[in-house]
Image: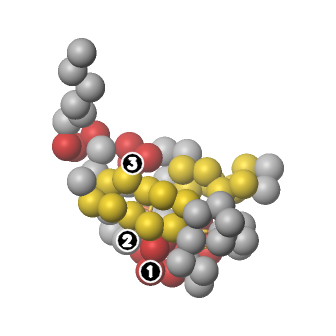
């Protein structure tokens, strides 16, 4: 089975540290592509394919709880 994905579909891997994230919503507000959402008190990477790896969420998070790893 070939599970490789085209680079254009997966620009970055976004990781959230659930222990450090306080669900403040700053990353949600700064994301220009509306990738992130707070749903029922949890931060979700709702639309990972839309991420453009701009790094704003990682840079703006005051708790170092979200990281973006470029593919
Ligand atoms: S900015 Fe950081 S602490 Fe706030 S919701 Fe996003 S990941 Fe969580
Ligand atoms: S890297 Fe940019 S586009 Fe991707 S989730 Fe973070 S703020 Fe949004």
Could you tell whether 35 is left or right of 28 in the image?
A: left
Position of residue 39 measured from the top left corner of the image (x, y, whole percent)? 73, 50
Kindly report which numbered mark, 3 or 1, lies closer to the viewer in this rendering: 1
Query: What crowding class fits label 3: few (fewer than 14 Cα within 10 Å), some (14-19), or many (20 or more)?
Result: some
CB of mark 1 within 8 Å of CB of mark 2?
Answer: yes
Q: Is mark 2 within 8 Å of ligand 2?
A: yes
The residue tagged 1 is 59
**Residue with the most extreme top position:** 1
**Mark 2 element type:** loop
Q: Residue at x 65, y 61 (%)?
A: 18
Q: Residue at x 48, y 58 (%)?
A: 15
First reached walking from the N terminus: tag 3 or tag 1:
3
Position of residue 28 measured from the top left corner of the image (x, y, whole percent)? 59, 65
First reached walking from the N terminus: tag 3 or tag 2:
3
User: Quarter for ligand 1?
Assistant: bottom right
**Residue with the most extreme right position:** 40
Pick whichever, 28 or 62, lies toward us: 62
The residue tagged 3 is 50
**Mark 1 element type:** helix
The residue tagged 2 is 55
Residue 33 lies in what quarter of the image?
bottom left
Residue 70 lies in what quarter of the image?
bottom left
In space, the residues marked 3 and 1 are separated at their CA atoms by 18 Å
- Residue 24 shows in this picture: yes
Is residue 49 depicted above or below 37 in this figure? Answer: above
Q: Is mark 1 within 8 Å of ligand 2?
A: no
In space, the residues marked 3 and 2 are separated at their CA atoms by 13 Å
Pick whichever, 57 or 4, lies toward us: 4
Q: Is mark 3 within 8 Å of ligand 2?
A: yes
Question: Which quarter of the figure is the N terminus placed in?
Answer: top left
């Amino acid at each position: 089975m070939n599970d490789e994905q085209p680079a254009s579909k997966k620009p970055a891997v976004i990781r959230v540290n659930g222990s450090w994230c306080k669900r403040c919503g700053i990353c949600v507000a700064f994301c220009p592509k509306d990738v992130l959402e707070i749903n029922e008190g949890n931060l979700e990477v709702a639309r990972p394919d839309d991420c453009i790896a701009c790094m704003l969420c990682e840079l703006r998070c005051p708790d170092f709880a979200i990281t973006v790893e470029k593919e």
